[in-house]
Image (tube, rainbow, N blue to C red):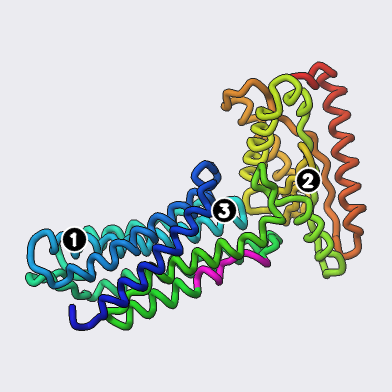
Amino acid sequence: MSSSYDLTSVYVTNILGITLIGVLLVCNLWRLRDKKKESHYVISMMFLILSSCIMDPLVYTLDGHPGKLAWAIVFFGNSWLYIVNIFVSSYWVKFTAYYANGFLPRPHMKFINLMVVIGFVILVVNCFVPVAFEVDANNVYSRRPLFFAFLAINYLIMFDVIFVYIIARRRGVYLKFLPAWIFMIPAFVGAFVQSFFYGVSVIAACSAISLVGALASLQNDYIFLDGLTGLRNRIFLDRILKESVGRKNAFVTGVMLDLNGFKAINDKYGHAVGDQALVLAAEILRKAVSNVGFVIRYAGDEFVVLAKVHEDEEVQKLLQKIREGFMDFNRTRKVPYRLSVSIGYSVQDLSSFDSDEFIKVIDERMYEDKKSFYTQYGEDRRSR
C-alpha cells in the first residue's frame, strides 16, 4: 500500500485538522464546565476527531514497516479510526436532537446505539477473522468486504439527522440556523473520497471542517436561547408567533406557567439556589412536554409551552404530565424547597388571532390559577 499514497499530503491534511480542532477547543473550553448534553457531545466529537487526526498519519507511516509493534499500531490504529467515525456521526445526531428538540426519543436512541454496537461487533470479529480489513504478514493494510457494510452503517447514522430535522419541524421549531447540512456535507464528502479513492486521507480533516462550520453557524442561533436554562427565549417565541399569523390552520395550544413561591426561594436561599430551581423546572417541563411541543423561558420564573395538540383530551393529558413531573420531583429530589406551577392555557388558531392577545389570554388564565392556588393553600405557601 505504501506506493498508493503520498505521505506528505497525509501529514499536511491531518495537521490542518489538528489545527482546526485546537482552535475549537480553545474557543469552547467553557463547554467542559457545562453540564448540558449538547456540550458533552460537542466536546466528545472534538477529542475523537483530534485523536483521528493524530492516529491517521501514524498508521499510514507504519503501514508496511516490519515488526510486531508496527503491526499492532496499524491494526488497532485502523480499528480505532473505524469506530471513531461511527461515534462522531452518532454524537452529531444526538447533539442535533437535543439542541433542536431538547430530547431524543427512546426508540431513536436505541436505533443509534444499535448501529454503534453493530459496528463495534464487526471490529471485534475482525480481530479474529479479517472481515472489515486485514493487516498481512508484511504489515500492509487492505480492505475486506465488510468494510463497505461498515461504511453503510456510518452513512445511515449520519443521514439519520434528517429524521431529527423532520421531528423538529413537525413540532414547529424554528430551524433557520440548525447546522444539519453544514455538518453533513463536508463529512459525507470526506468519507466518500477516502472510501472510494484508496490511499487518500481526508475523513478526519473533513470532520474537523464540519464541526467548525456547524459551531460557527450555531453562533447565529444563540440569540434565540436562554443562557441559564438552555430553553428557547422570548425573542424566539415572538418570532414563531409572528410567522404563524396569517398561515392556514395555524392551531396551537399555548400554556403559560409560573413557579409558585419562587420569590421566597430567592429570599430564603439566595439567587444561586433560585437559578438552580429555574434550571430544574426547565428540565421537568422539557421532559413532560417531550415531543408534543417545546418549552420557552418567557421571563423570570415564567415559562410558555407551545404544543401541537388541540383536542381537549390531549391538552389535559399534557397538563397532567406537567403536574405529575413536578410532583415526582418533590418526592424524589433532595432540595430544600418544593416546586409547583400555576397554569393557564388556550387553544387558538393563530392565523386569525393576534399574537399579543394570545399571550394575554394564557397569562390571565395563569394568574387566575395562581390566585386559586394561594386561596386554597394559604399565604404561608409563598414562603415555603
Q: Is mark 3 on a helix, strand or loop?
A: helix
Tell me what residue is drawn at x 78 percent, y 49 percent. Answer: 312
Left/right of residue 84 with respect to residue 280 in the rendered view = left
Q: For the magenta stretch, what is the residue range?
A: 176-184
**Circles 1 and 3 in contact, beta carbons < 8 Å:** no
Tell me what residue is drawn at x 79 percent, y 57 percent. Answer: 252
User: Residue 116, position in %: x, y?
Assistant: 36, 58
The residue beneath circle 3 is 98
Q: What element carries label 1?
A: helix
Left/right of residue 184 with respect to residue 316 in the rendered view = left
User: Residue 103, position in %: x, y?
Assistant: 57, 51
Q: Say if the magenta span includes residue 179.
A: yes
Q: Could you tell which of marks 2 and 3 lies nearer the N-terminus?
A: 3
How crowded is the residue under tag 1: few (<14 C-alpha within 10 Å), some, or many (20+)?
A: some
The residue beneath circle 2 is 298
- Nearest to the eye among marks 1 and 3: give it: 1
Q: Say if the magenta span includes residue 367.
A: no
User: Residue 110, position in %: x, y?
Assistant: 44, 54
Q: Quadrant of the C terminus?
A: top right
Three-letter amino acid code at disc 3?
Tyr
Report the front residue among 337 and 292.
Answer: 337
Report the front residue among 99 and 110.
Answer: 99
**Circles 1 and 2 in contact, beta carbons < 8 Å:** no
- Nearest to the eye among marks 1 and 2: give it: 1
251 over 34 or under it: above or below: below
